[in-house]
Image (cartoon, grey):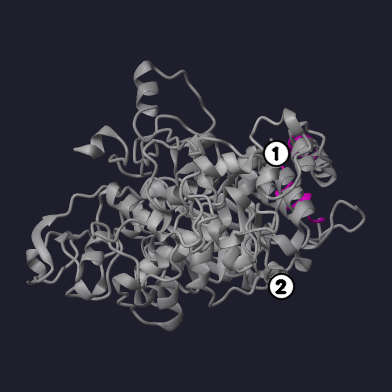
Amino acid sequence: MEDSKYPPGTAPIKAEYRISLEPRSVIDDDDAAESKSSHINGGHHAISEEYGGQDTLSPGKHHRMSKEEKKRRTGANKGRRFGKTRDKLELCWKVARGDICEFGGECRMTHDINEYLAQKPRDLLFPQNVDSVPIPGSSSEEHSVKDSEMTESYYPPSVDPSSSCPLFHTKGECRSGFKCRFLGAHVRKSENGELELVKDEEKVARRKVETTELNFLPLDTLKRLRSKKYPLPITDAYMKEMQESESKKSMTQETNGKTTFTEVELMNGDDGKAQRDSPDVPLRFSEKKRLHWRGLTYLAPLTTVGNLPFRQLCVSLGADITCGEMGLATSFLQGSKEEWSLVRRHPSERVFGIQLAGNKPGILTSTAETMAREFGSTGIDFVDLNCGCPIDLVFRSGSGSALLDAPAKLSKILIGMNKALGEIPVTVKLRAGVKEGRNTAHKLMPRLAAETGIGTLTLHGRTRQQRYTKLADWDYIRECVEAVRAREADEGLAPIPIFGGGDAYSSQGYWESVEHGCVDGVMVGRGALIKPWIFTEIKERREWDISSRERLELIRKYAEFGLNHFGSDTTGVNTTRRYLCEALSFTHRYIPIGLLEVLPGRLNDRPPAFRGRDDLETLLASPDSRDWVKISEMFLGRAPEEWVFTPKHKSNSYGSEESQG
């Protein structure tokens, strides 16, 4: 069929796979990829607005909401909650891991392992490959253990010795112990007839470095943060310096009617070099660790979906640089366990950063100082300041893209963070501007590169107001890069890496953007959410017509990574299920390139109703959240009856009345 017969923006599906020319019914608000929804239970500061709505407030201003506004903000999908699914009888974690509980009889949980195993759900069977994985709807779909499959009668009915535990397989031990839903893989009968946990000491020693996650914050540090007793000498000195400089600025204005003060003087002397007579200035800008990122692939920081298991999957597919989910600086300083879990790093992440959002120099400098002290340059390679988030609640607080219209404040923030982080570089992610038709990045970027000592700039080629309604403006990205390079040349500064962002969805498109935008690389966000294997395509400079079984293997790997991260007990299994479904809410949008008449595929094209080349490919393209849950059940067993899933950017929910029709 000729392209002219397709409505604009429609993917050209081959006739043999096309069901009709009518567009497939799917809601895919891409702002959901940037919205804040805490990775555990919705969090204490979950940010989820009616995406795409019009702003009525300017940054920093507040007003009393009417009943209608409150109702709008608390409606469907505004404050998602995912309650933890627990065992009916809770076994003490100490006992579950083979240790002695210090609370003894006063412990609120049971210490009776036999009683716990008697009511524990049957072991799950996690496949080591997808060759034998049945497609939902087949007669062999059930993954729970049948009594007839039990091979050794002395095991309780809940334990299957043929089970395979992803944690035990990877690490040589399982931290969930007797609570593991794959317990049969690492338990045996002792000489006295009791069940005991198995540990592969050789594998534990051999795999410890490559499997142990990094950046755990001690509990006593969290307590000091919550009680505001954490020492922050660099921040204190910087804030005092700022106050003195502001006084100097005020006096100068009164005397001369103008000011000669610039924010850069807070870090540098009048001669442009960092002052070394103060112990609170650890490094000159020139002594910062330089980032050599040209040619590297960069996975964008993505809230909720961009968690550690997803980043680990992308690294296995070729991502070189990864960044944790956006975290709020205020929540870090309040000692939020949920927020600090966002900085967890897998050893496979070769270049890893943390992204912060905030609007005050003192708070962001304090957060940066805490991270530098706790993790150092071995735990984090850079800290990124979010100056691009368009979501209403972030913008209205003066954070995210609101900082684009506050260059003086932004400079103070970056200088303070630079001082606090020592040799760890600061990077900035920003948008073209706030309002459509009023781009400002070409003025802001050269100033930031020359005056604040940042290590990298990343420019998303849309304004805050545009969201994702138009294609990224790569002509403007090139203009901004040229402006930065011109100032660097004028002032004899070493060039910093500059990345562009927007619409990267194929190898061809990626490399064309690099060339056209004169950038060192392209940050990949939505493209990675929909097809994580895009990094393989970029590295190998090819378009990969990935098969349905290959895609299913990536889903299996994600589930394995999730269990290793979240745990293999009942709660961990269903937390993994939740985030797997979050990922499937994006990957179902992938249109197999073997079905397209024209290559490469384009990110913003929407398909008409179509069928895949096999039943599995059709299932993986389903926009129905119930099918996403079915796919999760192929690896994680049946979802509990009480478990629900509300997609971040869709209204149909697994477990809701709307999804049962």
227 w.r.t. 425: above or below: above
- Give, as a three-letter code, the residue at label 2: Glu
Q: Where is residue 543 drawn, in percent x and y?
A: 33, 78
Q: Which residues are magenta?
A: 248-269
- Give, as a three-letter code, the residue at label 1: Leu
Which quadrant would the C terminus be assigned to in this image? top left
Q: Which residue is tagged 2? A: 202
- Answer whether residue 335 is visible to the viewer in this image: yes
Task: Tell which of 557 and 61 is nearer to you.
Answer: 557
565 w.r.t. 298: above or below: above
Task: Tell which of 6 and 562 is nearer to you.
Answer: 562
- Answer whether residue 176 is visible to the viewer in this image: no
Horizontal relation, residue 447 to residue 432: left or right: right
Packing grade of label 2 (10 A; few <14, some 14-19, many >=20) is few
Q: Where is residue 5 drawn, in percent x and y?
A: 7, 65
Q: Which residue is tagged 1? A: 333
* Label 1 secondary element: helix
In the rendered structure, does residue 253 fall within the stretch colored magenta? yes
Task: Tell which of 654 and 401 is nearer to you.
Answer: 654
Horizontal relation, residue 269 to residue 531: left or right: right
In the rendered structure, does residue 190 fall within the stretch colored magenta? no
